[in-house]
Image (tube, coloured by chain):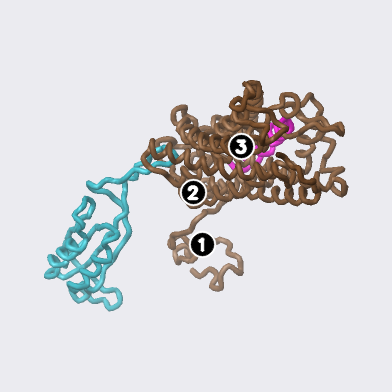
Amino acid sequence: MKLVTAIIKPFTLDDVKAALEQVGVLGMTVSEVQGYGRQKGHTEVYRGAEYSVDFVPKVRVEVLVDDTLGDKVVEAVVEAARTGKIGDGKVWVTPVDTVVRVRTGERGTDAL
Amino acid sequence: MAAKEEESVEGNTAWLLTSAALVLLMTPGLAFFYGGMVRTKSVLNMLMMCFGAIAVVGVLWVIYGYSLTFGDDVTGGLFGDITQYLGLSGLIGNEDALTTTAFVAFQGMFAVITVALIAGAVADRVRFGAWLLFAGIWATIVYFPVAHWVFDFSNDSGHVGGWIANDLVAFDFAGGTAVHINAGAAALALAIVVGKRRGWPKEPMKPHNLPFVMLGAALLWFGWFGFNAGSALAANGLAGVAFINTFSATAAAIIGWLVIERLRDGHATSLGAASGVVAGLVAITPACAFVDTWGALLIGVLAGAFCALAVGLKYKLGYDDSLDVVGVHLVGGLWGTLAIGLFQTTYVNDTGVSGLFYGGGVTQLGKQAVGALAVLAYSFVLTLIIGYAIKATMGLRVSDEEEATGIDEAEHAESAYDFSTLRSGTSPISKAADALAGSKVPANASKEGVTP
């Protein structure tokens, strides 16, 4: 099994969610996060005093999938989250040893 | 141009009472103007400093403040007779004094807001008790005397007033000297005594709620119509002039501030617009019933520009006047007070004289400067003394740790905003923790009570 983690621009979340549903993903976890990559932050000015805001708001999407689905999911996210401008985010895949569904105790791919 | 219509005591009293209520509203307005500019962890303390000023100064005013300010002069124009109206004796219950009681109320609101203005200079870091003590002492030995100098006019029935109004004859219609220069100079002194906030100016301390700031500025503007037009002490044409100048100069000041910002920083900001409102209001305060439309517009637009430039000074000079009381109130107050000597015209108000630009020469400008500098120096020095005295005895500041955690929690045991479900009283985690700690929950707090 794989854990696909995507850091995306907040406004692309709806498109990413729709794309994931289209490739058969049944659930996901999203969280609001802050960070920066090459986009860096921005500058704000209050009464002439400049403040640099280093961290910009992003959304983190986490999806657990079967090994066979991994590449398709990555592709779907990348497609949906791309604007072509700096700061579109990152997607990465990590191997997962075990998954347990809390309600039933099912393990492995049955728990997805 | 002033009241040709027949004066009506009832009408004047009604307008004065209305104005008094408007001026009181300025202090809560100021609380939100300031409160929006501080960080989430200290907004309650800022609101409390303003409400605390209402509490302390309101009580002192009726006990002896009014008497010290408007009692017969006892020391060559410096102080009123504190015993004359002690507890408002001779005023309350005397029907002839109907308008006088309205005046007592109206002027009391001025004392309150002047003290509250100072709070902005020392946001986030002053112990609440020390602030209340400061408010009481400062009102007593700085505000009441200075208001006596500026606002207490001698009259035909034998009353002798203060020296700036009667001996020097510098003009100040509604409080450019007594309120704004006074509070601004005190703010500078107190910011120096209290010291910088931890981490200033390196750590970002940006405003947490700009809509509060805008709302506060709007309430200030609304209340300021009472402050300025009410200072005519009559429902007449002069009140109308003060009112319209308070409107137009302030509108111009928004433009002045935003133009400077756009040129210097690249953007016109909401904080700049709200600040421009206050800068314009401050500057037109002393001049509002002495200048014509062109004078008001020039005073306003330049006030916005001057104050927008002045708020940067604290970074160069290294004092943490946190919310720019000096840059806005001291600078705006000085400009407005001096501007009377430039733009004053007897066409508007025949009790005045003509300013420099209306053929009156520089004499009045000089008098305006003397009045302004006297108030500035008196307030600055006395505030330093009061500040150091409190610092040496009970202490002024919260501890470093309390300041870092937030003064709201340290001084008031409250937090302004509760967004996190993990920390709210309804979460199972905090309920369990409360139960373990044996915390007291009022019986009616929740039906479930504390269930571990």
Chain A: drawing colour: cyan
Q: Where residue B253 appears, x then y in whole percent?
A: 51, 40
Residue B362 is drawn in which quadrant?
top right
| Number of residues whose C-alpha sits closer than 10 Å to that of mark 2, classed few (under 14), some (14–19) or many (20 or more) | many
B107 or B64, which is in the foreground?
Answer: B107
Please tell me whether residue B143 belongs to the stretch shown in magenta.
Answer: yes
Check residue B292 in the rendering and tell me which mark sits there, or answer none: 3
Mark 2 is on which residue type?
Lys
Residue B410 sits inside the magenta stretch: no
Residue B328 image position (x, y, % from top left):
53, 36
Callout 1 secondary element: helix
How far apart marks 1 and 2 lie (CA) works out to 23 Å
> What residue is disc 2 on?
B41
Q: Main secondary structure of the magenta part?
A: helix
Q: Nearer the viewer, residue B16 or A4?
A: B16
Question: Gap in Å between the C-alphas at discs 3 and 1?
Answer: 65 Å
Q: Which residue is mark 1?
A: B434
Tell me residue A21's x, y (percent): 22, 72
Whether residue B72 is visible: yes
Of the two numbered discs 3 and 2 in the rendering, the one whose residue sits closer to the viewer = 3
